[in-house]
Amino acid sequence: MGRGRDRDEWRLRDPVRWVKGRSVTRSEDAGREPSVTAGADVFAVDGEIGGDLALVDWEATPLGSPARWPQSLRTAVSILLSSRFPMWMAWGPDLTFFCNAAYRRDTLGRKYPWALGRPANEVWAEIWDDIGPRIDTVLTTGRATWDEALLLFLERSGYPEETYHTFSYSPLRDDDGQVVGMLCVVSEDTERVVGGRRMTTLRHLGSDLSVVRTEQEMLAFTGRQLGRNLRDLPFTLTYLFQDDGSARLANATGVAPGHPAAPAALPAGDTDGVWPAATLAQGEPALVDLRRAPFTALPTGDWPQPPTQALVLPLLRQGGGPYGFLVTALNRYRPLDDGYRGFAELVAGHIAAGVASARNYQAQQRRAEELAELDRAKTTFFSNISHEFRTPLTLIMGPLEELRGQLAEADPRIREELETVHRNGLRLGKLVNTLLDFSRIEAGRMRARYQPVDLAAVTSDLASVFRSAVEKAGLSFDVDCPPLDDPVHIDYGLWEKVILNLLSNALKFTFDGSIRVRVRACDGHAVVTVEDTGIGVPAGELPRLFERFHRIENTRSRSNEGSGIGLALVWELVGLHGGTITADSVEGEGTTFTIRLPFGHTHLPPEALTPATGTAPSLAGPLSVTSAAADPYLQEALRWLPDDPTAETTEAAGTAPASDPPARVLIADDNADMREYLARILRGAGYLVDAVGDGRQALRAVRTTTPDLVVSDVMMPHLDGLGLVAALRADSRTASVPILLLSARAGQEASIEGLRAGADDYLVKPFIAAELLARVRASVELARLRGHHARWRTALIDSLREAFFVCDENGAVIEINASFADILGYGADGLPYAPAHPWWPDAETDPEAHRQVAESFADLLGQGRGSHTLPVTHRDGHRLWISATFNQAQDPETGRRVTVGTFRDVTAEHYAVQRESALASLSTCLSRATSLDDALRGALTELKNLWRARSVLAAVFDGDDEPALTATDGSPVWRLLPERRRDALTELRGRPPLSSVTDRTGAGVLLEHPEGPLALWIDLGDHRPFTGEDQLLLSLLAGHLAQGLVRAHQIDQQRETALALQRAILGPSSLPDGFAVRYEPATPPLEVGGDWYDTVTLPDGRIGIVVGDCVGRGLEAAAVMGQLRSACRALLLQDARPGRTLMALDHFAADLPGARCTTVFCSVLDPRTGHLTYSSAGHPPAILAHPDGTVRLLSEGRSAPLAVLPGRARPEGECDIPARATLLLYTDGLVERRRRSLTEGIDQAGAAVQAGRNIAVDDLATQVMTRLAPEGGYDDDVALLLYRHPAPLDVVFPAESSQLAPIRTALRGWLTQCRLSPPVLQGILLAAGEACANAIEHGHRDAPGGTIRLRAEASVDDLRLTVTDSGHWKPPRPEINAHRGRGMALMRAMMQHVTVTPGSTGTTVDMHTRIT
Amino acid sequence: MATPLTLVPDLRPDGVALLTAVGEIDMSNTDVLAAALERTTGAVVLDLTSVGYLDSAGLSVLFAHVDRIELIAPPLLLPVLNISGFTDLAPVHASPGV
């Protein structure tokens, strides 16, 4: 540290001066014979330094000859020389310099031996300003100093080097007690400080949790982090290669842009540029000398002098040339060693990964958006164009109909043109409707209602529509449809389109021969074939036959008209029915289309099923029906055929109004004969006829398609004629439909009269046909005049893109338009819809949405006006969002108060908003994740909630036999998944990433997981539609997730690094034998806290053992802990007395914020004797578990926590740890619980140690932690340290028989420490001896030079011996070596369990015996 | 280097050869013991009172002379002699005063 000093005053010295100074000294030395000074025996302690000290000309120093040195100096020198810890000392008026071997090695470097005997201020001239005042303090006050990690520039390696030292100066006194010198105990922290600084930078680099980041943001962020470490990175430049091969400066730290060293661009192929871009483009690093042009006036970073070298590293790209390169100016005060280079490479690696990540993300994002945009545009286009055509078409066709009526008598040419307009209008309408069908299918809004029908009858009815046209074309028409035994579920309207399209297609391409329609049952399916003898389809075109807008060019047909979508629609419609359609064709011979529909309804969504009704041409009777939908097909087909003047005459011969489209009449009569009779009469007169069996069916039929006239019998089941009249009149939409009642008996005449206000007309049976026709015609014409306005209104409302509805005063929906049905799936046939309406969200499963709708409905009833955006449920169950506006109005006819409203489907907008929030919410979730697994689990839950899915499953194909699974529910196993799911996931794996797929049960997507491809499946439950919007969202989220997972993975890796770092400050990396430790931090994921344990092996072989507990927890406490631990360690090394150590620690803690009130148990153990000296600074007593089962608390030597009473002497306690006893040191987190006394906890800990006194200490440590853990885990830091006396014996020796005796001696000594009786001891000795002899003889007979390891470990009752060799045992051959067999017998006799485990790398003999 | 073992040959007053061993006997020095026993003829008494360790390699040397040997052994060595069955084949006397 600069310690606030001016930079100019940094005491840096030219290394040359060093060489000079030294050479002068040596030349002086050379001038006289080196001679050993008298009294030099004081230096004999150390041969290395002592020898050089003896050569110093002491007479030339104020200290004079060593022979005359005071005893105090001699003692100090011998302590210094005998210590293995780095130390130096200064003595006398000039502070004459001494040091020991460790100091020479670590710190003095090239100044040795010049420094010996010189004044200290000369030796350390370059740092004297730093250390001089400290030494003065020591000398004047007699108080020791303490400095931790002080920055000093040492010139020990030929250049000023950045170093950090922790040291303490303590006074040295002469024989009279006067302070005459100082002793410095020092340890070098350079590696730790510099390493820590670099780790900090790397951690900062990895700390950005924001998931989405552009390249620019990433570089800016990285730059900010690199700019925080101007010591290791005085300046950096990040260049990125451009497409043209040049390099662009993308980021600079520590240097201003525009500096000559930081050109904005480096041209391609420039070999003489400022930076060696060409070399880097090859992926090679370069080391650049900065002491030449153009590197002048370089920034200096945090240092006084500019850097002299820069390391230039490529930003490597996997499987490609580098992205660019990173210039890192190097700290001139540190060598470019492996650590430094590794650091720079990690930084470059991080930037390269960041660039890769940002570019990859950008590319993925762009791709997903483009795909989605394309899809959306296509659907919108279809939807818009259809709607936009429909409105003008309505406005063309309405007036056109009128014109045709008005101009019935006009000039034939005008009429002909009008007919042309009319026919083409119909054709356009048909095309638009087809397109609309497509957009409905695409948007999942096709509202099919499947009901059981006799498919043969329906199909043959439909076919008959074409009969006249086919025959007129000179073709034979063969309809072969015998009734089927089982019903088939179809949507009548859709099926009609299928058959009409196929027939129209056949007619178009067939010029002679026949068209044949057949219906059969085959293999559980109804099979419908439409076969023609037309021109056929070329084989190459067959596969594309059902493609949308695909037309076969240059074929002969009756017309060139055609959009190429008819067959595509057929294909979609058959698919909706759960069926298939195929085409077979031979060119020139004909084409056969084959449709296969399953019987039954299990293949159809249950909510779309309706029971059989009479309205459809159904099982109720063989009534022929011509739907308005057939008209355009027929008209179009007829137009292809040559003109036939008789056709018009035939049409004109009808009694229906010739100028108008045929009027539609609905017949309601329960008598089938009557129904048929009426139908025949009316159809014969040119009317379109529908027929139903009762009033209820009639009501439904009227609401679906409003007829021009209803002819109803009075007497009918369910709802009679009078009821029907009342119901129709009550509904504004049907109030104007004219009704003709048929009464059975003349006696009812009076009541019929009374009903005249309701019905428009009546007829009494029997009646003659002419009478009926006259009444019908009159009613229809009257109604057409009357209803013109109403129809016009209906047509307009129906052409609205917005859904339209009218509610009565109770809130029941009584009128709707087509868009309403399109959007919600609830059509006019279900009117009226009483509240709560069926599209309300379910109160059980989605109470929030239900509440929202209920509130706005209350508005509708109360205020009568409003505007709301609401969630509603489509008839097929999927969620929609609508934006509704409504207002009160007065019905002009009835005077009732009604509410008129419109709404629009804002699902797309809603989901766009939702998409944004879903992305945000996923980001939040990912940024909170603390691990890769956590990130994935969180994300799956987000997806599950977003789609209200049943479950979400992720399979990572990580290269193992089975993919690793993660799910929102439970822990699934791959093998136990349904096969269908396994197949779906495996299939996903073969798809491009981020393109989602969907089927009836859910949706899936593939994305990249750091451990392999991840297939993700969202299980939506049955038949929930997953729209294009959903698929887009899933793709985006998957891209996002992939990105997040990469980052989580990086965080995982960084955390591992951080953990390694934390563990390094927690405790010693290796423990002496016999010890076991545990640490449980209170604040995960931190691995450190305020508690610590430590062991220090002291120079004399004793072991310092410390357990401490700082106030607080978490990182702050850990920082304090780290310093206290280091200090305590250094203090113990200096003075191995626990009491003194704690007193010194008091002073240290007093100046260290946060260290006050730390409790410490500090002890020194002699492992040979078990003698323990200890002192406790307010710490809970250590626990000693005796082998006899008793427990003793080490509660002597107690005093206050640290820094509470500084300067107060601290008492010490002592005890002897008996053989095979176990010592437990711990922090209060182990024993302290709420609402329980500490004593109780300590007793429990004692009992736990006692209970495990027979298991190995390491296992015991685990057991104690487990036994004492409170429910829910420890909520405070816990440190625990166990020692069992004596520590295990562990020796490794060469496999030679001469080693047997010394090993026996060592083992005998250890066994004696275990206090075993002589016979037991002798038995164990013999067993060990035999095992070792075996190892020498069998294991190494043929391979000398191996080693043997003997390990002995004792617990209270048990002793375990392990002998391991590194050779191959020869199988014993008793005939040669009888005594070896005897040896094994002896081992078994002496020990209770003997196990011999041969292995490829050696043999292990494991023996146990009870020793009590 | 072999384990230290000193063997002092002597003759008892009754003319029986007496070999006194001091040290430890293991596979590194059984050849020394074997050679010393080879040098005696007829009955021999081997005094192991001052031997602190005897392993199976040493036993195998003793077994080779089991028909003519008598042992004087300290209590510490008795278990190994018993377990190996040596005491069943040759006389073993407890060391006096130990």
Image (tube, coloured by chain):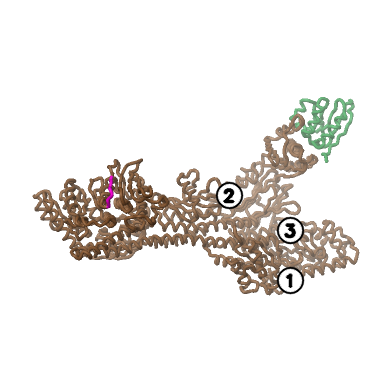
Chain colours: A brown, B green
Amino acid type of disc 3?
Gln
Q: Report if residue A146 is visible in the image.
A: no
Q: CA distance from mark 1 to mark 2?
A: 57 Å
Query: Residue A684 location, x and y as percent?
Result: 18, 52
First in sequence: mark 3 or mark 1? 1
**Mark 1 vs mark 2: in front:** 1
- Does residue A524 lie above or below A59 as drawn? above
Residue A311 seen in render: yes
Residue at mark 1: chain: A
Tell which of A836 and A752 is nearer to you: A752
Q: Which chain is home to disc 2? A: A
The answer to whether the residues at label 1 and label 2 have Cβ atoms under 8 Å apart is: no
As drawn, the label of residue A1134 is 3
Amino acid type indicated by mark 2 = Gly
Q: Chain of mark 3?
A: A
Q: Which residues are magenta?
A: A473-479
Magenta segment: does it hold A968? no
Q: Pinpoint residue A896: horizontal percent, then vertical percent.
A: 21, 63
In three-dimensional space, the C-alpha distance between marks 3 and 1, rounded to whole angstroms, equals 30 Å
Q: Which residue is mark 2?
A: A1241
Q: Position of residue A656 (x, y in %)?
A: 18, 57
Mark seen at residue A11: 1
Left or right, A1023 with respect to A1212, comes to left
Image location of residue A1285, percent across then percent down: 69, 45
Amino acid under disc 1: Arg
What's the CA distance linking mark 3 and mark 2? 35 Å
